[in-house]
Amino acid sequence: MAEPLRIIRSLDDITTRYTVFEKDQVLTHDQLNDLAGYLDDQDRLTRVALLGAGIVAGLRVSLSDAGVGVTRGVGVTTDGDLLRLPADARYARFKPYDKSAPAYAPFYVDQDVTKDMLPVFELVADDTATPLAQLPNGLKPSDMAVIFLMESYVRDEDMCTATACDNLGQGSIHAPKLLLLRKSDLKALQGSLPTLDQAVRGLPDVTVDRPQIAANFTPAVYRAVCGRVHDALAPALRALYPACASLLADLFAADPGAGWVAQLETVRNGFANRDSGLQYYYDFLKDLAETYNAFRELLSGDTTVCCPGVDAFPKHLLLGGPDGGTELRTGFYPSPLASRTLDRQTHARFLAGKLDALIRAFKLPPAGTIRVTPSRGEGQSLEERAIPFYYEVNDATPVHRAWSWALTQRGLEKSNYSYNADAYNPGGFARQLATQIGRFDFFRVEGHIGVKATDAVEALSKVVQAQNLPFQVRAVALSQDRTKISVKPPIRYTDLHRLHYVVRQDLVSQLDDTTRFSGAFKGQVDAAVAAKVVTDQSEDTDGASVRAIAQQKHDAVTAGASAASAKINRGYLEYVADPSWQSDVTNTMTAAGQFKANLGKVVKTDFSTPFDSLIASNHTLWLGWLDGVIKTKNDQADDKLLFGNFLQRHPGLEHFAGVARGGTFVLAHDESGVVVADFMLPYVCCEPDEAAPPEPPLPKPQVKPPFVLEQGATVTASREKLINDKLTSFRSDIGQIQSSYVDAFKDSIKLVGNVLTTNPKAQVGPKVADPLLDIHLREMDLQSEKVDLLRGEMLKTNDADQQKALDAQLHDAEVALATAAGDTTQFLATSKADVKAGSDGSKALEAVSNSVSRLNNKDALTQVQKGLTAASGKATTPELKGSIGTVLKSRGLGG
């Protein structure tokens, strides 16, 4: 029985030699076949090894009433056959593809060509063939799948006659066929090639849980989360090498998975009973998970196959079912040359080495120098960020060489930013904050865990200030007790403090007025005793010395006011720290009250004195109330620095081992004041507390005239003095009665004489020869008398309305006097009067000076300054100019 015709596979036995022909050589069939086989094998190897295998493009299958459609396309079998359909085709008919065709093992039961053949049908465009609707055994086109077969076989072309049988050679046939097979019979045809994409798809997923930050946070919250991440990482690391051994075999002498997991277990045990540094343990596991996931991502979708095996789909391509599904379709497996994935594979190998380096290099350092390192946020890959400080850097674990594939590829591994950068001699990059940081959107902050919060905040604030870093530092207490807050501003200066300062300054002013009035009052007492207006020791003072009482109370007022002013007139913090000012003010009030009360029988009060103002003032109460309001506001502000309250206001608080540009770095300390955790907000959470500005004494407006401060009380004669004066007056009156008739007669005669004779000019002021100057002097004298008269009237009445009316008249009189003084001086200037000693001009200037000395109100002083200044401008002699300047200076009006 003849051997059945079989489909042949060319690359099962690759021809490695061929004959080099010589001149006049007689060629044999072996020599010619070797050459043809070699060239064919090389052609096939070029397709498979340098381009790839599988469906390259097109060859999509569809089903309609018009039949099975196949789009144009091309593909390569693993035997190197190029299957090409140059144009779209649609087939409505079929014919059986049976054992008469060359045998192809996948079409037979158990792939044994000696057994039964599976039902296979060839799609044909022959109108005489059977319609697809008449598939046998109730089969439907939708139950079938399309196979593109390269029917390769060798057929003997010998043709013999009765007299001869010439060898015409064998024919090597390669005919593409489109066939239909039941979907259920495709198992042997669904060959695939192992790829890195398939390898990583089979690896476990590793995700990192976020710890839930609550008001009762402790670092132990991270322990449970770290346990879950560890449990996810362990099986993933064990599975990594076996799945990707084809890529990693030359990188590791043996499967490193078990060693990795053992080292991770050691690290976990080290944190079993330790809270300090748990956040860094969590960060370490995040690094591993991110590196592992980046490894998978690089290889995901990588269907590259180097030197695919012939057995996968040697002579066929599975095009899929008419329903368009891809699960029954041969994929494309590009060669490394065609896919351009070599860099991705190299990068993935680098990350596998990085996993090994990170696991071996993890070592949590003790608290030390606090440093800020420019980095990138988690939106960038781990390789683009700074190396965390918990990776030890030394020759045994050169983690900086395994950190960034891009930098290591260019030989720039020393350019990695890191807390430990000095350990690998980075050169200029050691000056991390001194060089441009514009490209960095994140800053790692390390070295503060285990440090006192006050020290950590101070150190970080200095770095931020000195290096102009774009983030804020805050500290919060993991406590519900505000007394456990370690770091808070010394003062939160607000408008309440400004009001407080004004009230304090007003109280200081009152104390100053009290001291001044006390001195003036004591002076009046001393003068009255010296003038014997008041008897020093009398019944009015119960026999006590008036002078002694005045001295004692003045000393007490001065001492109390001075002590209180010194304590009140300080910065707010010093003021709050020493509340003894209250007793000093109380002592001052007591002494002032006693001063006035003890001399009440010889004191007349025309209006409220500074003693009365101080005693009646509520400013001491205001200060107490303001102190209470400020303290309440400060307590409320302090409460915001308790972790639970801070979290409620800023629920986005999360640990990132640093802070984003423009954000807030939050240090969390325990009740002992030690930093145990850190968090970040991506924004500036709080306006900086305003520091207390300098508080110099406020300039005191010169509103109260000296008269009010110094003449509020008048010492009156004691009763003994009044009785003696009355007796003396009575004796004088008796004597004068006897002469009254004579005086009356004389006055009558004088009056008659005055009527009958011309009334001579009343002589007022200095006598001068120039009549015009005399008129000016008489005008000044008249206005001076008016001013003096109005002031005397004001002292005689206690009626408020009358006082007000007199005060208005006094104001106008002083302005008129100032105008007269100015006019007189300008007359002297324009008339070029002689002002030498003894001259009329000199006498006139003396009168001007006396008039100016009577002026008190602001408008009058302004008016006289204006008039005298104008006269000085018109003066032609230095003597007159100097005299006018002297008058101005005497009242502090310049010259």
Image: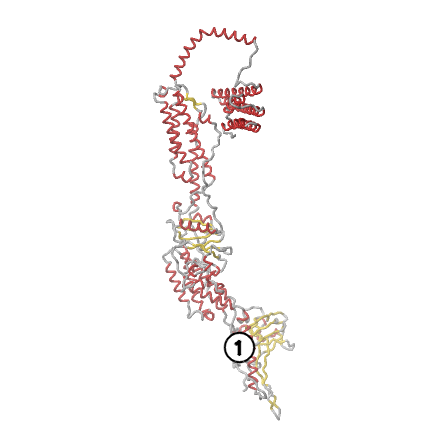
User: Which is nearer the eye, 551 or 120?
Assistant: 551
Quarter location, residue 540: top left
Above or below, 104 against 783 in this view is below
Residue 689 visible within the image: yes
> Looking at the picture, which amino acid does disc 1 mark?
Pro
Colour convention? secondary structure
Above or below, 250 against 431 in this view is below
Across and down, in percent, residue 579 comes to 38, 36
Across and down, in percent, residue 3 comes to 54, 85
Residue at the far bottom: name it: 163
Residue 185 visible within the image: no
Going by the image, does 459 lie left or right of 765?
left
User: Which is nearer the eye, 402 or 188?
Assistant: 402
Across and down, in percent, residue 405 comes to 48, 64
User: Which is nearer the eye, 350 or 239?
Assistant: 350
Which residue has dot 1 on it?
106
Going by the image, does 551 lie left or right of 651?
left
Above or below, 225 against 325 in this view is above
Q: Rate crowding at label 1 as few (under 14), some (14 to 19) or many (20 or more) other CA atoms within 10 Å.
A: many
Across and down, in percent, residue 304 comes to 52, 70
